[in-house]
Each structure stands twice: as C-alpha cells, then as structure tokens.
Amino acid sequence: MESMNFSYPKANKPVTSRAHVGVVASGDLEVLIEPAQTSGASVSITTSVHGFQDTWKVVMDRFFNRFDKAVEITINDAGATPGSVMLRLQQAAEVLAQ
Amino acid sequence: MITQSSVFDFVQRRSFIELDARARAASLLDSGSAIELAGPFDRMQSPWLPLQGVAPQSDDGCVVLKGRIAGKPAVVIALEGKFQGGSIGEVSGAKVTTALDLAVRDSQRGSLTPAILLLETGGVRLQEANLGLAAVAEVIASVLKLRPYAPVITLIAGTVGCFGGMSLVAGVSSYVVMTREARLGLNGPEVIEQESGVEEFDSKDRALIWAIDGGEQRVALGMADLLAEDSVDDISLAIRTCLVKGVPSVHRSELVDLYRRRIGSLDVREQIDPVQLRAQWGETEMKGGIR
C-alpha cells in the first residue's frame, strides 16, 4: 500500500456540496470530494499498488487543468487504471455539480 | 419459454444486481425518505486493513439507510460485495449491530422498524480475524433481539452469495429472499473442496454448486422463502410481501426438531442428489415459499 498527497493552490472556487462515487473493488476506486478547509485544493490518495506516484501526479495534474474548485479529494484505490481514475474523477465532479 | 414479450420485459427491467450497495438499499426505500447513517464522509473505516497493506473503504463496505417502505419505517443494511468480498470486519460489523439495535429501540418505543439485510458476503474478513467473528456473534444477537418486534428480512441477490458466519445471520432471519443467481451456504465451495477433496465437492462445477447452494434449490427445500427475479421491481415486491406478512409465528431457526429429523433420515452411504433431496425434504412439513 502507498499513500501520497498533492496540492493545487490555484483551484480556489468555493463549493458547498459533497460527492462520493465508486467502490474499492479490484481495478476500481472510490472518490470523495468535500469543500476544502483551507484555500486551494488538495488530494490524498491511498492505493494498494506500489510505485505509480508519477502516473498519479500526471492524472491529477490533467484533471486540475480543467477543474478549479477548492476541494479536498480523498481516493481509496484498488489498482484502477489511469483511464478509470479519470472517469471516476469526472463522475465525482458531475455529482458535485448536481 | 422465451417470447417476444419476455425478451422485451428482460431488456426493460431495471437490474438490481448491477447496482452498488448504496443504490440497492436506496432502491428499496420510498423515494426521498432515505437517510444514511455513518456514511462515507464520517470515515468509519477499517483501521486494520492499511496495517496489512490493503486500501480501506470510507464506509467499510457497509451501507446503512434508514427510511420508509410503503410509508412505514424500515432500515436497510447493505454489504458491498465488491469490497473485500463483502466481508464483515470490526467496523462494518459494528455498523450492522448498531443499526439493528437502533431498530430494536425504535420498535420498543412503538415505532416498529423492520430490518432488511442485503447480504453479499463471504463471511468474516480474514484480515480482522477474531474481531470479525465477534461481529458475527453480535449481529446474530441483535437480529434475535429485533425479530420478536419486527421482521428481519435477508435478501441475497448477487452471485457473491452469502457464506460463512453471515450465512448464520441469514439462518436466524425471519425471511430469506433470493434470486436464482444467488447462493447460500455455510462453507463456500472452494473451502469444502480444500478441506474434503475434489471428489467430495468440485468447486469448478458450477451446475453442481447452483444445484446445491442456488436460490431455486434453497427455496424448494424451505431454507429460503421467496424467489425473486433480478429486477428492482420484483425484489421490492418480494420484500414488501414479507413486510406485510410480519413477524412469523415460528422462525425457521426454532424448528430444531424438524431439521434434526430431516438430517437423521438422510442415507449418507451414497452421494446425496440435490433433486432427490428436494423431493424428500420439499414435500415434508415445511414447503418452500412464504410460511
């Protein structure tokens, strides 16, 4: 298992809602999005797979290219592919906007 | 027989099995009535899994929704079969027990609150060992406390099935509802094969497994009460049928003499055939279907 954190200080649009999607099933992950307690956005990832910190960083950077909300994102991952991770993030962003 | 209209019905139905635990639980409650207790944002997750290198889940694979069914109070407790095989650990066990105990408290205060358990589980979570075993004991104690007041209905819908310690919980429930795809058994097929050899039970023989553990056989033997199709409407109807029936005059787990006689009458010199067993047991005092 590996844990990592990223921060995106430029994502600073306030939100009031929360979102929870996904299940920590094999090849899948759960994503929780909540309003940030401090300024900017932060991401906290727990994954059962070792050694993919660079890949996670690329996926999160790409997501935050377009996502600009001040949120805390928590991810529990059981070996999802980068494509699945991005889809779950977009799904969570959609739920958040509803 | 497959007809044009049966194919149409099949395509049009809203599958229950394809939903995750939270959506399954919500689908049984009156729309807008559900409140989640100890949900994912409360972060009641397993402290033991990360210590063993396993990613936890923020609800520990257990969803508790309190709401109403047909206008009356009910609590739905759903295990997520895709997270760690729906296994019961310290935290998920405590959530199930506490939800049942709250239903007992409400029922004692005059607001009868039946519980619906959606069990998709291989039983005790091995990583939490004794804590999981203790959880099973606590859940059973709480089911026994609730069932004199309001029915406790176990629903086994998906192919994960209900095995191990949690099959005992199904056993003490007031009613058990299953789909054809679901399985119910104390020891899972792999465990039996591992312990007794492949000649005793071939865990790769799917036809054999479903002939013994499958929903159709369980209902035919009177070990489960209702068979439902994999559709939200059909399963919801089955649950409501049990709710209307109310607390049964006698619970299955109280029929000790019946089951002693049944087991005593088995000829174990030859392999017992599931079809024969159905003929032998299905025709005795307790038939399948609702009591």
Image (cartoon, grey):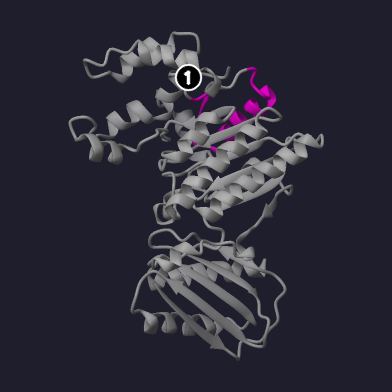
Q: Is residue B151 magenta?
A: no
Q: Where is residue B220 in the image (x, y as percent from the top left)?
A: 44, 19
Q: Residue at x 46, y 35 (%)?
A: B167
Q: Nearer the viewer, residue A83 or B197?
A: B197
When the figure is inspected, residue A85 is found, relative to residue B253, above or below; the finding is below
Left or right: B263 as drawn, with respect to A72: left
Protein chain holding label 1: B
Q: Is B181 situated left or right of B155 in this image?
A: left
Q: Where B191 falls versus B277 (above or below)? A: below
Frontmost residue, A62 versus B284? B284
Residue B32 seen: yes
Counting from the top left corner in percent of width and height, residue B55 is at 44, 66
| Residue B287 can be seen in this image | no
State the residue position of label 1. Answer: B222
Position of residue B57 relative to residue B37, above or below, is below
* Magenta stretch: includes residue B227: yes
Task: Tell me which amino acid carries mark 1.
Answer: Gly
